[in-house]
Each structure stands twice: as C-alpha cells, then as structure tokens.
Image (spheres, helix red, strand yellow):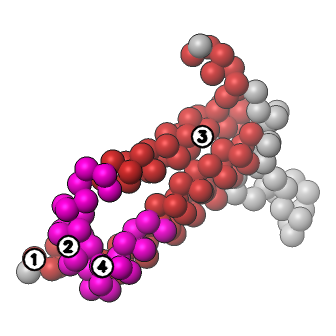
Amino acid sequence: MFQRLLAWFQRIPIDDPVDHRNGVFLQLLLLCEGLRMPLNKLYLLLFNWSYLKDTLYDTARTGPRVAIAIDLSTDVAMTLAAWVGIWLVRRGRFRQPDPRRHADAERPDAGTACAVDHLRCAGPGFRDWGDPAADLQ
C-alpha cells in the first residue's frame, strides 16, 4: 500500500527532475500540515477547551469572541493553503513562467506561495493576542 501511495505522489506532470523530487516532498509536507492543523484543533477544542479558554481566549486583548474567531479563521486559512498547494502541485503548477518577464524567467513555485500564505495567516493571530512574554513583566 505504501508503494502505491508513493507512486501516486510521484505521478505529477513536472518534467524537471529536481522540481519533480521537490514536488513529491512538498505534497507530503503539505499533506501533513493539511491534516495536522484541523486534527490538532479538533483535539484541543474537544479535550482541552477549558485550558484554551482560560489561558488564550479569555486573556486576549480583543476579547474572547474575537480571539476565537481569529484563531479558527487562521487555522482554516492555513489548512486551505496547504490543500491548495497540493492541488497546484498535482496540476503541474509547481513553476509557471511569468508573463511580465522574458520567457525564460520563472516566478516563485507553488510551495513558496503556500509557505508565504501560511506565514501571512499566522501573523494576525499573534499580533492580536500580543506577546505572552511581554505580559509576564
């Protein structure tokens, strides 16, 4: 079964051997992230709700409702970014020519775009909750 799964990951329409290997690894990485984020959040919400509420949501400067909304929306956005990244790699959109440059130039690959989106999604939650170390002083 593992061989069939690995063969499925390797069936991507990318001709360059280096990009092909990177695409296989990127799919595995994004799959782990696309599954980890919602499963981890589900676990925390089901089994550690009181801890989340007392330590994170109730102490947020924006209030608990806004903190919950920010937390869940960033998790959804990061999960969607991971799955969109897998979809892009599966469609062979790992690298595409940039029409604004000459024909040989390439724009950032799908993995870079998903990683940047991932970081953009995580930023607002941290900014709105503040730095926990600063609150201890």
Q: Amino acid at mark 2?
A: Pro
Q: For mark 3, give the secondary structure.
A: helix
Mark 4 → mark 1, Cα distance in angstroms:
19 Å
Label 4's element? helix
What residue range appears in magenta? 45-73
Tag count in the figure? 4
Query: Residue 5 appears at what percent x and percent y?
Result: 63, 21
Quarter of the rendering containing residue 114: bottom right
Left of 130 or right of it: where is 103? right
Q: Is residue 97 above or below residue 24?
A: below
Q: CB atoms at circles 2 and 3 under 8 Å apart? A: no
Q: Which residue is mark 1?
A: 136
Q: Which residue is mark 2?
A: 132
Horizontal arrangement in the rendering, residue 1 relative to residue 11 (left or right):
left
For badge 4, the amino acid type reads Pro
The x, y position of residue 131, in whole percent, is 24, 76
Residue 108 vs residue 104, the one in the foreground: 108
Q: Give the vertical position of 130 relative to 77 (above or below).
A: below
Prevailing SS of the magenta stretch: helix
